[in-house]
Image (tube, grey):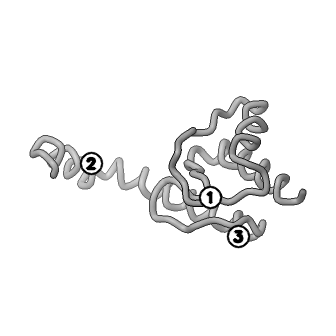
Amino acid sequence: QVDKFSENMALTVINDPYYDKIKDKLYKERLRVIQTLTKSNIDFYNTDSNFILVNSQSSKEEIMVDLESDNIILYNSLDGYNSYWTLPLGKPETNDIILNVLRYDNLE
């Protein structure tokens, strides 16, 4: 159940044109990442949220170590499904680095 204050805040955001631009950017970036994962034959679950469940050859922990060398700290959670782990979406530059690590991992 949502209280009145939270409901009003959500409605304010939904009706604000500034957030429409942000939602559009996030939507386009999610589509781009999904297209890249598909072209790279990386298994994932499609989503309408700002994260994707991916299945990599290496464990999430190994991917996290690779990303730390690029100064990227991957969101760490217990969210996931079987061997799929949560890949949060960020800025295109960050997503590109993560995608490169996943593509390289998929070659092995």
Q: CA distance from mark 3 to mark 2?
A: 32 Å
Q: Which residue in the protein does label 3 denote?
A: 38
Which circle, 3 or 1, is nearer the viewer? Answer: 1
Q: Could you tell me how many numbered marks the image carries? A: 3
Where is residue 63? Give x, y as percent.
74, 43
Q: Could you say which quadrant of the image residue 97 lies in?
A: top right
Q: Amino acid at mark 3?
A: Thr
* Location of residue 68 (image quadrant): top right
Residue at left 78%, top 48%?
Answer: 101
Q: Earlier in the sequence, mark 3 or mark 1?
A: 3
Query: Which label sits on residue 13?
Result: 2
Residue count near mark 3 (Cα–Cα under 10 Å), binned few <14, some 14–19, many ≥20: few
**Number of other residues with Cα within 10 Å of mark 1, as a class: few under 14, some 14 to 19, many 20 or more:** some
Horizontal arrangement in the rendering, residue 43 relative to residue 30 (left or right): right
Query: As shown in the figure, which amino acid type bears the numbered disc 2?
Result: Val
Q: Residue at x 57, y 51 (%)?
A: 86
Q: Tell me which residue sits at (36%, 55%) in the image.
A: 20
Which secondary structure, mark 3?
helix
Mark 2 nearby-residue class (10 Å; few <14, some 14–19, many ≥20) = few
For the residues marked 2 and 1, what is the alpha-carbon distance in whole angstroms?
Answer: 32 Å
**Side of 36 relative to 53 (left or right):** right
> If you read the primary sequence from the N terminus, does the residue marked by circle 2 or circle 1 appear first?
2
Residue occupied by mark 1? 84
